[in-house]
Amino acid sequence: MIFYFSATGNSKYVSKSIADTTNDKIIDIINIENYKFNLEDNESIGFVFPTYFWGVPPIMLDFIDKVEFSNYNNNYVYSISTYGY
Ligand SMILES: Cc1cc2nc3c(=O)[nH]c(=O)nc-3n(C[C@H](O)[C@H](O)[C@H](O)COP(=O)(O)O)c2cc1C
Protein backbone atom coordinates (compact mmCIF):
# COMPACT_ATOMS: atom_id res chain seq x y z
CA MET A 1 0.00 0.00 0.00
CA ILE A 2 1.66 3.21 -1.17
CA PHE A 3 0.33 6.58 -0.02
CA TYR A 4 1.47 9.51 -2.09
CA PHE A 5 1.21 13.25 -2.31
CA SER A 6 2.24 14.82 -5.59
CA ALA A 7 1.74 18.37 -6.82
CA THR A 8 3.43 18.20 -10.22
CA GLY A 9 3.47 14.45 -10.82
CA ASN A 10 7.02 13.31 -9.89
CA SER A 11 6.03 11.54 -6.67
CA LYS A 12 3.02 9.98 -8.37
CA TYR A 13 5.31 8.68 -11.13
CA VAL A 14 7.68 7.18 -8.54
CA SER A 15 4.74 5.61 -6.65
CA LYS A 16 3.32 4.10 -9.81
CA SER A 17 6.68 2.76 -10.95
CA ILE A 18 7.18 0.96 -7.63
CA ALA A 19 3.61 -0.30 -7.56
CA ASP A 20 3.86 -1.65 -11.11
CA THR A 21 6.99 -3.58 -10.11
CA THR A 22 5.80 -4.84 -6.73
CA ASN A 23 2.15 -5.31 -7.73
CA ASP A 24 1.11 -2.87 -5.03
CA LYS A 25 -1.67 -0.29 -4.95
CA ILE A 26 -1.25 3.48 -4.80
CA ILE A 27 -3.47 5.86 -2.88
CA ASP A 28 -3.57 9.64 -3.39
CA ILE A 29 -3.80 11.23 0.08
CA ILE A 30 -5.62 14.27 -1.30
CA ASN A 31 -9.32 14.17 -0.43
CA ILE A 32 -9.06 11.03 1.66
CA GLU A 33 -12.04 10.91 4.02
CA ASN A 34 -11.54 7.55 5.69
CA TYR A 35 -8.16 7.27 7.40
CA LYS A 36 -8.62 3.63 8.45
CA PHE A 37 -6.91 0.95 6.36
CA ASN A 38 -6.77 -2.79 6.78
CA LEU A 39 -3.40 -4.35 5.98
CA GLU A 40 -2.85 -7.72 4.41
CA ASP A 41 -0.37 -9.94 6.24
CA ASN A 42 3.17 -8.62 5.63
CA GLU A 43 1.92 -5.86 3.36
CA SER A 44 4.41 -2.99 3.23
CA ILE A 45 3.41 0.62 3.83
CA GLY A 46 5.03 3.33 1.74
CA PHE A 47 4.81 7.12 1.89
CA VAL A 48 5.97 9.01 -1.19
CA PHE A 49 6.10 12.80 -1.37
CA PRO A 50 8.14 15.75 -2.61
CA THR A 51 10.81 17.41 -0.49
CA TYR A 52 9.51 20.81 0.60
CA PHE A 53 12.06 23.15 2.21
CA TRP A 54 14.30 20.17 3.07
CA GLY A 55 11.44 18.55 4.95
CA VAL A 56 8.18 16.65 4.64
CA PRO A 57 5.17 18.57 3.25
CA PRO A 58 2.74 19.45 6.09
CA ILE A 59 -0.09 17.69 4.25
CA MET A 60 1.83 14.39 4.43
CA LEU A 61 2.74 14.92 8.11
CA ASP A 62 -0.94 15.58 8.82
CA PHE A 63 -1.92 12.41 6.96
CA ILE A 64 0.65 10.31 8.85
CA ASP A 65 -0.73 11.68 12.13
CA LYS A 66 -4.26 10.66 11.18
CA VAL A 67 -3.86 7.34 9.38
CA GLU A 68 -4.74 4.16 11.32
CA PHE A 69 -3.94 0.59 10.36
CA SER A 70 -5.65 -2.57 11.42
CA ASN A 71 -3.81 -5.91 11.20
CA TYR A 72 -0.52 -4.05 11.76
CA ASN A 73 2.16 -6.41 12.99
CA ASN A 74 5.55 -4.78 12.50
CA ASN A 75 4.86 -4.39 8.78
CA TYR A 76 7.69 -2.88 6.77
CA VAL A 77 7.29 0.91 6.54
CA TYR A 78 9.30 3.14 4.22
CA SER A 79 9.25 6.60 2.76
CA ILE A 80 10.58 8.10 -0.45
CA SER A 81 11.08 11.80 -0.99
CA THR A 82 11.53 13.21 -4.47
CA TYR A 83 13.49 16.43 -4.79
CA GLY A 84 14.46 19.09 -7.24
CA TYR A 85 17.74 20.76 -6.40
C1 LIG B 1 7.20 24.64 -2.07
C2 LIG B 1 8.32 23.78 -2.62
C3 LIG B 1 9.46 23.55 -1.86
C4 LIG B 1 10.50 22.74 -2.34
N1 LIG B 1 11.60 22.54 -1.57
C5 LIG B 1 12.62 21.74 -2.05
C6 LIG B 1 13.79 21.52 -1.27
O1 LIG B 1 13.93 22.02 -0.16
N2 LIG B 1 14.75 20.73 -1.80
C7 LIG B 1 14.64 20.15 -3.03
O2 LIG B 1 15.55 19.44 -3.45
N3 LIG B 1 13.52 20.33 -3.80
C8 LIG B 1 12.52 21.12 -3.34
N4 LIG B 1 11.39 21.32 -4.10
C9 LIG B 1 11.27 20.60 -5.37
C10 LIG B 1 10.36 19.36 -5.24
O3 LIG B 1 10.73 18.57 -4.11
C11 LIG B 1 10.49 18.48 -6.50
O4 LIG B 1 10.22 19.22 -7.66
C12 LIG B 1 9.55 17.28 -6.38
O5 LIG B 1 10.00 16.23 -7.21
C13 LIG B 1 8.12 17.64 -6.76
O6 LIG B 1 7.34 16.48 -6.55
P1 LIG B 1 5.87 16.33 -7.17
O7 LIG B 1 6.02 16.44 -8.69
O8 LIG B 1 5.44 14.96 -6.76
O9 LIG B 1 5.04 17.43 -6.61
C14 LIG B 1 10.38 22.14 -3.64
C15 LIG B 1 9.22 22.39 -4.40
C16 LIG B 1 8.22 23.20 -3.91
C17 LIG B 1 6.99 23.45 -4.75
Image (spheres, rainbow, N blue to C red):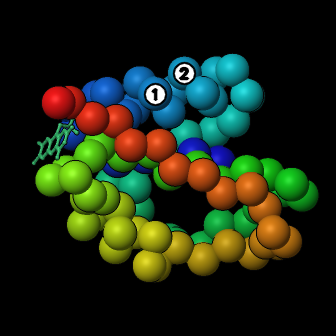
Q: Residue at x 64, y 21 (%)?
A: 20
**Marks 1 and 2, how far apart in space?**
5 Å
Q: Is residue 4 left or right of residue 31?
A: right
Q: Which residue is mark 2?
A: 17
Q: Residue at x 84, y 71 (%)?
A: 73
Quadrant of the rendering where the C terminus is positioned = top left
Task: Please provide percent x and percent y for residue 37.
Answer: 65, 67
CB of mark 1 near ligand 1 (< 8 Å): yes
Q: Disc 1 marks which amino acid?
A: Val
Q: Which residue is mark 1?
A: 14
Q: Quadrant of residue 70?
A: bottom right
Q: Are marks 1 and 2 in contact (CB under 8 Å)?
A: yes
Say which element carries label 2: helix
Q: Disc 2 marks which amino acid?
A: Ser
Looking at the picture, tell me which residue is in the foreground, 79 or 16: 79
Q: Is residue 9 shown to the viewer in this render? A: yes
Task: Please provide percent x and percent y for residue 2.
Answer: 57, 46
